[in-house]
Image: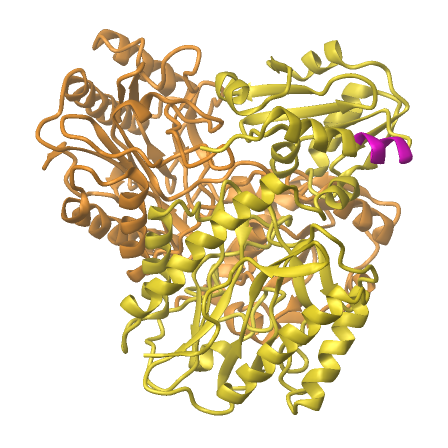
Chain colours: A orange, B yellow
Amino acid sequence: MLYASKEEIQNRIDKLKILMEKASLDGAFFHYKIDYYYLSGTMQDSLLFVPLEGKPVLFVKREISRARRESPLEEIVPIRSAKDILLHIKPAKKIGLQLDVMPYNDVIKFKDLLGKCEFVNVSPLTKELRKRKSPFEIKIMERAAAIQKKVYRYVPEVLKEGITEIELGGLLEAYAKKLGHEGLLRVRSMNYEAYTWHVISGRTGSIVSQSDSPMGGLGLSPAFPVGASMKKIKKGEPILVDFGICYHGYQADQTRMYAIGSMPEPFGGAFEACREIHYRVLDKVLEGMASNELFEYSKNLAEKLGYGDYYLGYKPHKVRFLAHGIGIELAEFPFIAASHTYPIEEGAVFAIEPKMVFPRKGACGIENTVLIENSRYRILTDNDESIMIL
Amino acid sequence: MLYASKEEIQNRIDKLKILMEKASLDGAFFHYKIDYYYLSGTMQDSLLFVPLEGKPVLFVKREISRARRESPLEEIVPIRSAKDILLHIKPAKKIGLQLDVMPYNDVIKFKDLLGKCEFVNVSPLTKELRKRKSPFEIKIMERAAAIQKKVYRYVPEVLKEGITEIELGGLLEAYAKKLGHEGLLRVRSMNYEAYTWHVISGRTGSIVSQSDSPMGGLGLSPAFPVGASMKKIKKGEPILVDFGICYHGYQADQTRMYAIGSMPEPFGGAFEACREIHYRVLDKVLEGMASNELFEYSKNLAEKLGYGDYYLGYKPHKVRFLAHGIGIELAEFPFIAASHTYPIEEGAVFAIEPKMVFPRKGACGIENTVLIENSRYRILTDNDESIMIL
């Protein structure tokens, strides 16, 4: 297992404190585990307090010996009741809490405990920090991508005519787990779950669902209405495999296309258009174009190439993003999206996914996880991109 | 796919309204999808409003045609902005919201939108409703258990000396998915995730982690510190397979024991003690003993049988529950737990799991999903219970 070093965690905490000072925060609590994992190195059942002055304190409910092994923080203490928190913190005027994800009732308990101080949402600060990945994080994401590369090479061994989408998805998942894939793709949302079995074929590629994605897939039931279904995969239809990998909590995202026999039109041509958009947008990322401009640029390209109606979904179900940052959550900063205005900076890792949906016929597209470093882009998911015909 | 009928949903709404009237609620919003699935039949991205008087309204963000196919509710309308809600609701004094799970910032948006009315947590009402399963729900849970039965019969085909815990877990999951298993085991918690690959062997059975479970397992990394690990399974050690199945959102939970070659002591004897506790507690359930008394009764039995130190974990890591209700969430009412005081009623479905942990050696136990009906218990997970020696 890989553990974050003392320097790695100290560096993250130092950067957080700079942002906290700008926001006039005296301290901040991190109760949502994604963020305290980032700031402490452990996901044991804990609560992290970071004061503007002084050392962070990790309060651990269960299990403290593992937390001490995993986290390089110096102050790791057991917590039996909420009042234990008061022994370790000073009176404050303004305190950060994760108000975007913490349940209302839990926030009220904090307010009751800490009395008259102002509470503000600290999540924009950690989201800002996580826009840039460290060399340690990139190393882990490279390992996730290496597992993913093997999984995509395994597809031809198990993709046969007549196999159901879910059976194929399950076999890929089993293979990936053997290699260290952790199964869950975490998302910062009460209601949205991402599955790793996003295998869709033929007409299921044109089925829209609750997810903010150009294609939803049929899924297995009204309770799992996204992704792979019991539909059998047939000859001569587009097969889209969008299979995320998670390693030490860090994700890599990728989409490749397959067909048995041959890939019918319009999917062959549309796939080439997606690939062209993918690379031409990456060139513009390096030129410093802003997120919303990149999005518009890609839309214009899709129109010029003759695919405007199908690009990123069919109306009224078009989505308004082309890329999502990725790391310990599936959708982090930066995005390439209609409503985001910043440029994509050094250290960003994002999944860019131009996709096309043809009503009642299916979907196609490409997706890679890309790192911006040294004013260049590096594709972490760098296995063969061409349509694989089986 | 199975859809809830109009009568099924109407029946749930009617029962909810009785509880709402007792709580003096004029209406309630359901934004967390587990509960609006229960009350509407769909998990499309929606918001459900149930007024005390009049018909429920399902506001659907995405995707409305699927919501209309899946839900028998009459009022299903699109929602573009939060203000659309105001067109469909009357001024109210007291409104229910899911304050235990809804993020703080989302609740504040509701308060801003709806103005001066009192907001109370509606979740205790839906939890109360879901204590009793309907014949339709039981039918789905029987199907989940039927898939599970096949998965456990499949274990001997893939469990070999030298296979890693995670590879075995992945293979079981792939097989289960092919049969319709939906992969995720949903839990009502911001931080707690349940995995389906809870396969632990030998000493990993004695490793405690962040989960409220007698045994945690080593897991794969600090970011996934629970369940199956890269440890290879050896001859002559206890192998515990706790593999939950999800079908149409409903779960069945089960644990069985395996060994290659032979099962060493103390695990053989401890397993028999677990089995005795399991059945003697079920007899007391039928006699109407209260939850906390059942828990104490089981502890006393474990002590009499000579396993007091190991029962439900080794101190200081003992857990304070023996059984958890199960349905569309992994931990529903009723519980058999130290802090619960009600008897277990007709229509309850719960997973009872007496387990023993021996420090540095491993764990063993049994678990079944059990239905109380017609003053009897019926084990839904009714495959062979004995230790399987391979």
Q: Is residue A363 above or below residue B155?
A: above
- x then y, percent, for residue B217: 49, 71
Q: Nearer the viewer, residue B361 or B371?
A: B371
What residue is at 50 percent from the left and 65 percent from the top? Answer: B226
Residue extending furthest front?
B374
Q: Nearer the viewer, residue B191 or A259?
A: A259
Which residue range is magenta in the image? B17-23
Q: Is residue A368 above or below residue A285?
A: below
- x then y, percent, for residue A168: 26, 44
- Picture quarter containing residue A78? bottom right
- x then y, percent, for residue A146: 25, 53
Q: Is residue B90 visible?
A: yes
- Picture quarter containing residue A230? top left
Q: Nearer the viewer, residue A273 or A296?
A: A273
Identify the main secondary structure in magenta: helix
What residue is at 35 percent from the left and 42 percent from the top? Answer: A197
Instruction: Classify residue B193 as left or right of residue A378.
Output: right
Instruction: Classify residue B308 as left or right of residue B20.
Output: left
Instruction: Classify residue B35 as left or right of residue B296.
Output: left
What residue is at 31 percent from the left and 9 percent from the top? Answer: A309
- x then y, percent, for residue A201: 26, 30
Tag count in the figure?
0
Q: Quadrant of the C terminus of chain B?
A: bottom left
- Picture quarter containing residue A385? top left
Q: Is residue A196 above or below residue B320?
A: above
Q: Is residue A375 visible?
A: no
Q: Is residue B21 magenta?
A: yes
Q: Quadrant of the N terminus of chain B?
A: top left
What residue is at 65 percent from the left and 92 percent from the top? Answer: B306
Q: Is residue B89 magenta?
A: no
